[in-house]
Image: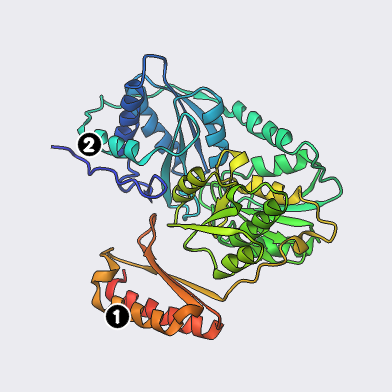
């Protein structure tokens, strides 16, 4: 009988508190072995995997466990070290390796960790492949753990840095002050170095990872520190990454915080004006603000809506041939950047725009509807429609909102939380309804 539960892949790979299943050594050894078996089945050539991490204290032993499983299947391992998820995805695609693994829990606290697996083309592993790995992880009987051979390949990160020069050959940030908040995570070394390579005067925030301070009051979930730095140093722009660098939240020179909806509105309109928006459509998730719908509609641009998760945005962009899409959280995908979320790339793309009146002026035209979001910790995740008190209150909220607002009620795909989000033309009504519904969810399901 198996000694482990099948690892459950969520919307962004495996994730949990470090040390708890599936992020425990035994499960991770089996996941490594399962991936190795899957790769070996695809041909006879030597299989190689690149692994990176976002700087959490648990990363070294997680790397060791994965490498033990991979090594048992004769797969060689290259360790990139501290890096961002987009850097790992780029190197996986360009270095003729079989797969990439990012050890990261993204925007989660330091005590969590996770594993994101990338196929040889740099895209996230397909759901069917994840399901096969989960099944193999239970069936396999890996050999006794041994010290794996891991090759240091941090040198490859220079190729990722060089790529920005190729993508923005005309960008000169000389004489401009740019603030960068790397969330004390994977971009702490990469992001300031790349900005300085363009000549910027760089002010660093959240660029001193110690294993435990990732996302702690800094990063994309906490742009307040970056905003203060932008105003203090009279900076031209601020770029705020999350722990693994695939999200970007920004601060303009006036101190306005700009999220993914601001960015989608900006580039949807800009690309449409440049006749570079295939199908005149932008892709966004159900979390995007109603104001984005209106701003794009007024500009003659359509908005294709998907479920939450960059996997869904990616699939829709592939289907529609869309040039840009993303999430309110700051995870933006551009077709000419391999459809990989990269907060630093998005920030540089904003800086590369012609802005004679300042960056704040670029974002004009998007007015956000009042929005309230409450994350309720839950002890279980039953179908919300089957919980009578929640279903009744949700129906009451929707009747009250009518056509002038909307309700989004769903579970997080990566955390034990229920997300209650309401938008309405009236801010007070929005907050009241959100708090009332959140209280019902807390009573019925709260942890």
Q: Quadrant of the N terminus?
A: top left
> What element does badge 1 sit on?
helix
Rounded to the nearest angstrom, the CA distance separating label 2 from label 1 is 41 Å
> Where, by quadrant of the figure, is residue 339 drawn?
top right
Is 204 situated left or right of 382 in this image? right
Comparing labels 2 and 1, the label whose residue is closer to the camera = 1
Q: Is residue 331 visible?
A: no
Residue at (77% x, 36% y) in the render: 169
Is 200 situated left or right of 77 in this image? right
Q: Is residue 361 above or below residue 318?
A: below
Where residue 431 appears, as percent x and y from the top left, is: 49, 81
Where residue 69 appears, as percent x and y from the top left, is: 33, 28
Residue at (73% x, 35% y) in the render: 165
Q: Nearer the viewer, residue 32 or 403?
A: 403
Dot 2 alpha-carbon crowd within 10 angstroms: few under 14, some 14 to 19, many 20 or more: some
> Where, by quadrant of the figure, is residue 119 drawn?
top left
Q: Quadrant of the C terminus?
A: bottom left
Residue that label 2 marks: 138
Q: Nearer the viewer, residue 176 or 260?
A: 260
Where residue 340 appears, as percent x and y from the top left, is: 55, 42
Where residue 378 appears, as percent x and y from the top left, is: 32, 67
Question: Which disc, if any, is residue 126?
Answer: none
Q: Nearer the viewer, residue 397 or 41?
A: 397
Residue that label 1 marks: 392
């Amino acid at each position: 009988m198996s000694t482990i539960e099948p690892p459950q892949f969520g919307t962004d790979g495996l994730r949990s508190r470090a040390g708890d299943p599936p992020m425990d050594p035994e499960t991770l050894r089996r996941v490594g072995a399962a991936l190795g078996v899957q790769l070996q089945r695809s041909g006879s050539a030597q299989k190689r995997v690149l692994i990176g991490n976002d700087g959490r204290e648990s990363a070294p032993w997680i790397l060791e466990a994965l490498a033990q499983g991979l090594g048992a299947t004769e797969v060689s391992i290259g360790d990139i070290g501290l890096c961002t998820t987009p850097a790992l995805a780029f190197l996986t695609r360009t270095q003729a390796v079989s797969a990439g693994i990012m050890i990261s829990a993204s925007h989660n606290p330091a005590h969590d960790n996770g594993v994101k697996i990338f196929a040889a083309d740099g895209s996230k592993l397909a759901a069917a492949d994840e399901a096969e790995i989960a099944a193999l992880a239970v069936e396999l009987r890996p050999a006794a753990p041994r010290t794996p051979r891991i090759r240091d390949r941090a040198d490859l990160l220079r190729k990722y840095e060089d790529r920005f020069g190729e993508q923005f050959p005309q960008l000169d940030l000389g004489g401009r002050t740019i603030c960068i908040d790397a969330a004390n995570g994977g971009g702490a070394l990469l992001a300031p170095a790349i900005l300085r390579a363009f000549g910027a005067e760089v002010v660093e925030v959240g660029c001193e990872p110690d294993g435990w301070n990732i996302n702690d009051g800094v990063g994309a979930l906490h742009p307040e520190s970056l905003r203060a730095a932008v105003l203090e140093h009279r900076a031209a722009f601020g770029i705020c990454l999350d722990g693994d660098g695939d999200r970007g939240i920004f601060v303009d020179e006036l101190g306005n915080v700009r999220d993914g909806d601001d960015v989608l509105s900006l580039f949807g309109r800009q690309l449409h004006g440049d006749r570079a928006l295939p199908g005149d459509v932008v892709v966004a998730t159900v979390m995007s603000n109603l104001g984005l719908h209106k701003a794009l509609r007024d500009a003659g641009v359509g908005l294709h809506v998907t479920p939450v998760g960059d996997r869904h945005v990616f699939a829709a962009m592939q289907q529609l041939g869309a040039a840009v899409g993303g999430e309110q959280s700051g995870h933006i995908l551009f077709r000419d950047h391999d459809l990989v979320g990269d907060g630093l790339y998005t920030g540089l793309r904003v800086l590369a725009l012609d802005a004679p009146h300042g960056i704040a002026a670029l974002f004009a035209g998007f007015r956000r509807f009042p929005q309230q979001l409450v994350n309720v910790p839950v002890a279980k995740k039953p179908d919300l429609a089957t919980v009578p008190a929640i279903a009744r209150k949700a129906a009451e909220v929707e009747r009250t909102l009518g056509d002038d607002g909307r309700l989004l009620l769903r579970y997080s795909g990566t955390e034990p939380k229920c997300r209650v989000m309401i938008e309405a033309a009236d801010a007070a009504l929005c907050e009241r309804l959100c708090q009332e519904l959140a209280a019902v969810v807390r009573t019925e399901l709260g942890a």
